[in-house]
Amino acid sequence: MNIFKKKLFLFLLVQYPITLAMAQSQGYSHADTLRGMLTKFRSCYDVYFYDLTVKINTSNHSIIGSNAIFFHTKENFTQLQVDLFSNLKINSITFRGKELEYTREADAVFITFSSEQIAGDTGKLFISYSGIPISAKNPPWDGGFVWKKDEHGKDWIGVACEGTGASCWWPNKDYVGDEPDSMRINIIAPPDLVCASNGQLRKKTPLPTYEISWEWFVSYPINNYNVTFNLADYVLLHDVYKRSDGSQLALDYYVMNGEEAQAQQHFQQVKQMLACFEKYFGPYPFTRDGYKLIETVYWGMEHQSAVSYGNQFRNNKWGFDFIIIHESAHEWWGNNVSCEDMADMWIHESLATYSESLYEECMFNYDSAVAYLVNQRWNIEDKQPIIGDYGVNYAHGDNDQYYKGSWMMHTFRNVLANDSLFFSILKGIQHDFAYQCVNSDQLIAYINSKCGTDYTWFFNQYLHYSSPPVFSYSLKQKGNDVYLFYKWKSDVQGFHMPLKIVASSSGDYFNKKKNYIRIFPTTAWQKVLIKGLNKKDFSIDQDEFYVKIEFIRKLKGVKI
């Protein structure tokens, strides 16, 4: 447990009742806090391995399963919390061969041990369960199982549970800030279906029950909602990504029977994607487990080393398959570097969305990337902060964690005006926080240390407030020159982001060339004389900075 988590644990011992009351007063239920908060019943232990077995019954959409939870004891305890949706039955919970007593509250399970567990010890809980898991109404946004038939009437089954939680289908410590170091996933399924899951396929075993046991092994840390499986009439395609240094990465594509030729051609862009993202972020994080695309009924999901793909082999108007690019970006942003509370999902979504524009830049040029970002900007709503509420399994109500967060990163790149530094920060985060769960404060502190400058004010404005900074300005023509009066309006005190404005322009209306200069507004009024500029030609560079604009026609009462 790192220093941050120790401090958080001590804080929660005192603050939990207060925090719980505040959460409920803001419209959250007790179930929300049970699901999202790192209480003493969770912080007392750390999971290092899951051994999950699930038998799939396609006739009645039920499952029978078990999970062995291997843990380190971090603090002395006699009771801990695991999670399993209340619609699923717990058959037994055992520890060292003896059944344990437990109580259920909403989707939380509180397990009582017969003796105190001592810090430094290890243990294994074995939970047997069964039932009919919830079905996803609109996957992947609405989580649960997906039970479909392909065009030939064969079963096509999968599960996606981000936000909803992995405990909707298997018992675990369903807290996003605790990942096992590795995991075994054993799926028992009908013999006419192929199973594709996370990690490496270790073995495929026929059973006396005329079923097949598919044993998969994940050799890296994995967040719980990324654990998945898919059952269908799949055909497996193999390929290899070869790097310039001679190293290789295995590429496996599980596609529906009959779509092999189309998939083989369409998925060639995977190699381009890997080359671009390794250029910007560093090596693909899960080399031992390989890279997989698995065709699914639903649109897509960033399941680790088993990316769900349901975009029907279509490229967008920019010439690439959005699902392949966005969901694969999560292998770096979300899977390698993960948030430790759902409130900080911008670490996953903002950076994966920004990665789309970097792919465009890699394949074409910077101007093309900016055009892509401008197209994204129409989706920004500015109604809620990007960072949500902590400790309640926060669900974002808009898309600003995607698109506004993407523009925040683009803006920060232009604030730095130093691409070498900017991309070294992205690579540094991937290297220095690899296979870890982090929070916003940690990442911002890291960025500050790499820059040698405190940019907390910048990130606080874009992450913690619904509105971006407002550039307030007025113009006064004086002969062939113009006076610019300007300042920032912001929620954060001391906001002082640089901005680019037009210093001169030439050419006709259709071929106007603009020359920009950087100015350094603060929250106090300033003025600058721009020589040789007509105020009708004045503009602000909104292709590189996400800001709102306030033009004051007649500025009164301002003395500079």
Image (spheres, rainbow, N blue to C red):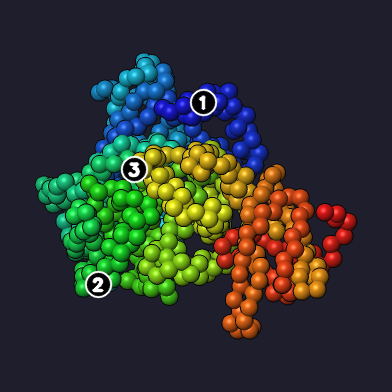
In x, y percent, where is residue 113?
37, 21
Q: Secondary structure at mark 3?
A: loop
Question: Mark 1 belongs to which amino acid?
Answer: Lys
Q: Is residue 323 visible?
A: no
Q: Earlier in the sequence, mark 2 or mark 1?
A: 1
- Across and down, in percent, residue 239 comes to 19, 62
Compare marks 3 and 1 and give the one earlier in the sequence: 1
The local crowd at label 2, few if under 14, some if 14 to 19, many if 20 or more residues have their Cα within 10 Å, is: few
* Residue name at image x 24 percent, y 72 percent: 265
Residue 263, percent from left and from top? 25, 69
Mark 3 or mark 2, earlier in chain:
3
Mark 3 is on which residue type?
Ile
Disc on res. 222: 3
- Residue bearing mark 1: 7
Residue furthest out toward the right: 557
In front: 462, or 476?
476
Height in image: 63 above or below 316? above
Q: Label 1's element? A: helix
Asked if the residue under mark 2 is in contact with the one under mark 3, i.e. CB atoms within 8 Å, the reply is: no
Q: Please name the residue that numbered disc 2 is placed on.
A: 265
Can residue 543 be seen here? The reply is yes
Mark closer to the observer (3, 2): 2
